Each structure stands twice: as C-alpha cells, then as structure tokens.
Amino acid sequence: MTFQPSSTLRSPTFLGLILAQITAAFNDQAIHITAFFFASDILVRSAAALGNIDEKSIVALVTGCFITPFILFSPLAGQIADKYSKRNTLVAWKLAEVAMMAVGLFGLLLPTLSFFDFLDATTRYRAAAVIVVGVVFLMGAHSTFFVPAKYGVMPEILEPAILSRGNGLLEGTSFVAQILGTCFGAALYIALKKKGGGPYVPTNEWIIGASLLGISLLGALATLFIAKMPAAAPDTKITYNWWTPVGRVFGMLRHSRPLLVAVLGIGFLAFMTLFLRQSLLYEGEMKKNLEMVQAAKPITKPAPTPDAVDLMEDDDGEVEHHEEVPLAGALGAGGTAHEKAELRLAVLLAFVGLGIGIGSVLAGIFSGKKLELGLVAVGGGLLVVLLLFAAFTQRLQTTGGMSVCLVGIGVSAGLYVVPLYTLMQDRAPKSSKGNMVAISNVVNMVFGVAALGAFYLSAGGVERVWGLTITPQQYNAAPDKLQAMYLQQLQSQVLVPSLLFLLAAVLTVAMFFILGRLLPDLTLRSLLWLRATRTARMRVEGLKNVPTSGPAVVASPAAWFEETLPLLAAIDRRIWAVTLAKNTPLGLERFAMRSSLVTITGDPDAVRLAAKHLAEALSRDQVVALPIALPDGIAAALWSEVLVAAPPNIPVVPAAVVPAEGRRGRTETWVYFGEPLASADLAAAADAVRRLVKSAEA
C-alpha cells in the first residue's frame, strides 16, 4: 500500500516524530549545559586544572563543538535526507543518539571508575572532560543530519491543510524541550555536585548521563511508530563536494522568491535569537559584576581568607591583614549576589524560549487549514514593538517587566517563523526538501556569525563612546583606587543592552523592508488576516486544488473589491485579482493596488492594458483571479486577451466565496476551490463556478 499523508495530527507517524524530536532537543541542551559545567569544574577548578584556560574558553569550546558539524556536514545531510527514506534516516540517527549518550555516560563515570585506576587522576579527569565535550560535537552532528529529515518529512506525513498546525506543534514542543533540557541539566548537575570547599572532585554526575541515555532510548522507540515511506529522490548522487549541493540550492533560491524569503527570514530569526541572547548575557555579567563589587565595598579590612591574604604594614608599622578581592571571587563561588544574578539570567533566557514555544503553537492555530503568510508581518510588527518596550523596561531595571517583554518577544518570533518553515517545506521541490532545510541551516550559521559580529561591534562601540574603559583585570589589580570609578562604570554598562534592544528593533524593520521588496504582498496579507480576525472568520476548503507552483487562473464570481478580499487571503501564493474600479478607492484597496490588485473600467484600452499585466504575471508563474461576470461584455474580452497572451495549458480553478453563520452567531466566510478544469474558456469556467456555488450553499 502506498504511503499517504495524514489528514489528522493524531496519526502515529506524526506523534512518533514529535516524541522523537522532543527527546532529541531535550538531550541536545541537557548535554550541552552539563558539558559546560563539567569541563569548567575539571579544567578550571579541579586538581587537574589547566592554568591557561578559563570559563570563557570553555564556553567558546563547547559552543564551537556544537555548531561546527552544521558548517561541515549540512550539504551532505541534505543529500542523504532526499536520497534515502526520511523515516530510515530518523531511526538511524535516534539509534546513534543512544550510542552518543552511552559515550557521555562513560565520560561522566570515568573519574570514579576503579577499573581505570592504572591511569593517574589528572589523566582520567582531563580525558573525562574531553569525552563529554566531544559528545557535544557528536550531538551537533546528530542535529545536522536529523533536522533536514525532520522538517523535510513534514509535507510527506501531513496533508497541506494541517501542515501549518503540525509545524506549530513541532516548533513549540521543540523549544519547550530545549528549555526543559537546559533546566534539567543545570539543576541536576548542581544537585549532584559535591558541596564544600577545596578543589572540585566528580562524584555522582554520572546520574545525568544515565538519565539522558534512558531518554534517548525512549526517543529511539518513538521513531518505530513512524510509518515506512519511500525516498523522495532515490536517484540523487551523493557528492562530498561541499559547494555542489549548496550551489544547486542557491540556484533554486534565485528563481523562487518565496523560497528566498523563507530562507532569509528563518536565518534572520537565528540572527535575532543569538543577538538578544548575547545582549542578555552581557547584561547578566554586568549586573553580576555590579552586585559583587557592591558586596565587596568594605574592601580594605575584610574578613581574611587563607588563599587571598596580603601581609602589609600599616602606618604604625604593625602588620595587618589586607585581602585583595578579585572580581570573580568577591563573594566566593556560590555567593548570594552571584547566585541571584545567574538565576535571573537563566530565567530570562528561559522566558524567550517559552514564548517561542507558545507563539509557534498559536501560529499553527491561527493559520487554520492553510499556510498563513500574513502572520509573518504580524509577528515581525509585534517583535519591533516589544523590542522597543524591552529597551525601555531594561532602563527601568524591572525584572518583572523585562520577563513579560521577553515572553512577548518569543511569542512574536513563533508567529513569525512557523509560516516561513511551512513556506519552505511547501515550495521546495519534493526531491530537494531535505537539501533545502540543510542549506537553510548553513544560512542560519552565517546569520549567527553575523549576530556575534554585530553584537561585539555595537557593544564595543557604545563602551568606547561612553568612555567605559576599566576592565575587571584592572579593577582587580587596584580595587582601592578604582572601586568608585568602576562602580560608576558598571552602573552605566548595565544600561548598554537597552541600546542593543533598540538596534535589534531597527534591524528587524530593515529585514522586513527587504522581505517586503521580495514579496510585495506580504504586508497586504497581514492586513487581510487582521481584518478577517476582526470581522468574520474565514474557512478554506479545497486549497489543494490550487497548484503550489507554476501559473494558474482562479475563476470566481467576485467582481468588486470586498468580494475579492477572501480570495486574496485564502490563496497562499502571489495572486493578482481583477476588480471593477471605484471613483474613490478605500484605504486598503489603494494599498492592494500596489501589490495584488488590477482595477478595470469599460474602456477597451484599459481592458487590454490590464490583460497585458495579468498575462505577464502568469508568465512569472503567479496566480491570476479573473471574474466570470462583468458588465458590458468586459469579462469575455478580458478572458480572451489574457489567455491568448498567457502561456499554454494553464490550469483554471473554479472558486466560490459563500458567507455563512458560524458558532455564537458570528459570521463566517467559506472559500471553496473546485477541481482544475480541462478547458480554459470562459463558458466552461462560469458553469463550473455556478455548480460550485450551488453545491457550497446546499
């Protein structure tokens, strides 16, 4: 029996995919944060510490291990996702994840295994840190190959009518799993870590590895519920030349503006996510430093500690204790101010992820049974507004207000990105869906590097302009002399992120200008969606009858602007609609004229000009909506002029717009699309439309 896409989200295949990706996202983040803590403790704070490495080096190392596979292997991953069954690819990499978590468990166990006592403690400790960080690299490779198959398989297992809702659930559960994985890894590591002073000694950290191994086994079992399906492009020739598949996909992007918009839009979200993350990390570090310096105000006569005591003579020649308090240890590890600052930062980052999860699910719900591109600009507009609010709230230094803004930013990002993922899945050729997702990951990495560059240039530029030149090292060298100046500087530095949030808002506006130039009807779709939510709910049936690529003509009874709006909103492709001209167009109508509307009068020259414009739109593989009834024979003239100048064998899809009374007395508008017609003449189209209207009203 041939595998068929499901019409429901309750299919075992989709549920198996959801559970598999939840466990993958959870383990990704859990091992990531565990590796950072474990490597930092061993290489910085244990007896096996390396003198030339610190926490910042560990952060760079762990992050680099995770993202490097995306850069190295993404083109290969895309080819594999298309050449072989995506189900087999998902199963194989979930089994590989089990092996990776087993390696991670071994690394966490190594310092405590008596079997390896023939190795000295220093060697075992350092080897354990290398193994656990190496697992982060392996999980990066896992994501590199798993993600193209995961996103590429969605159009194969779900019908187009529920693809947006499926993507919303997929994205939402993924972000929630990432939050839970980060919290799980961090909380369990802190709970298991041996308390007390002295050098770090590993004890029960292996329990984390055992837990993640169990979760990976659960995910591997979940993939067995995914139905067997054929490969999308079994004849694909695998090439290890990095540029060949990349060049092929970029060739598609040059010829498909919707795909280009999807890839650029998703990449910009990667940029914004990392840029805001760095801004929050910057704010957290400055607040932590500020609180630690404030807590160390009595710096000249503190209670001495054995490892930070200088013997100095006072003015009377008597020896007194004087402690030099380094910034990183002003309160000691785990000091109250330090913990509060770290906890606040973790909570704020979690709020962003939580918001994206909520927004992704809402995007699926709001999309209904179609790809709703109108949500892209709606989410982007909300993102700009909330970034401005966050900049203002950050200056007020209110954690509650910032938390609300960050959740809102996440919700906006979810509304924005889910339609773009659906657009990429829908528009990519069936034989290249996996490859398109893989190259999108490469673009995301490029945007991520650009985000880091933009952050360091902007933050460093603000510091130089504001004269914030004292470094923590300089303060540690002369705390008595620099305390007042450094305290004042830190009070200014904690406000730098407000400017970074403002910059993020400006960059978002710039990106939407670019996306709007590539898809001129993007903003119109948002206005139509907002208008529909305020006036009447719209339901769409038979959208699969409208071709997803190539030129098409939609025949409908709509002749006036208000009748045409549902067609513009229902079809998720670039569409030009024909309406009768008014003496005084409405505001929305004037806006639509720029991107999606052709108005005509009874003048023959005006009809010929409109027909020429519509024929050119069809030659650019766009959709044209033609009315079947216009006064004075205009419809017949328009149809003949358009179809004569248009490419041959264009599918004609009959459409009907029928108002109905929905639940709670609210008006609903139903848009129906019938089967494409074999004949493209006006008479056949008019007859099909009348039959469709009669059937819909019945």
Image (tube, rainbow, N blue to C red):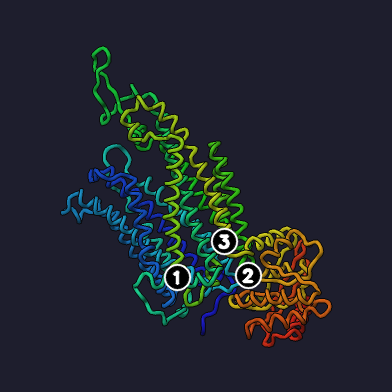
Q: Residue 47: x and y, percent? A: 23, 43
Asked whether residue 452 appears in the rendered view, the answer is yes
Compared across the picture, whether 268 is left or right of 71 comes to: right
Q: CA distance from mark 1 to mark 2?
A: 28 Å
| Residue name at image x 65 percent, y 74 percent | 623
Q: CA distance from mark 3 to mark 1?
A: 27 Å
Q: Residue 383: x and y, percent? A: 58, 52
Q: CA distance from mark 3 to mark 2?
A: 14 Å
Where disc 2 sits, the SS reads loop
Compared across the picture, whether 658 is left or right of 120 comes to: right
* Mark 1 neighbour density, 10 Å: few (under 14) some (14–19) many (20 or more): many
Residue 270 numbered tag = none
Where disc 1 sits, the SS reads helix
Q: Which residue is mark 2?
A: 574
Q: Which residue is mark 3?
A: 515
- Pointer 3 with pointer 1, Cβ within 8 A: no
Which is nearer the N-term, disc 3 or disc 1? 1
- Pointer 1 with pointer 2, Cβ within 8 A: no
Compared across the picture, whether 170 is left or right of 121 comes to: right
Q: Quadrant of residue 571?
A: bottom right
Q: Residue 576: x and y, percent? A: 68, 71
Compared across the picture, whether 459 is left or right of 602 comes to: left
Residue extending furthest right? 632
Which is nearer the N-term, disc 1 or disc 2? 1
Question: Relative to residue 503, is residue 579 depicted above or below?
Answer: below
Q: Which residue is mark 1?
A: 149
Please name the amino acid that badge 2 sits on.
Answer: Arg
Question: Relative to residue 124, is residue 571 depicted above or below?
Answer: below
In front of the other: 191 or 119: 119
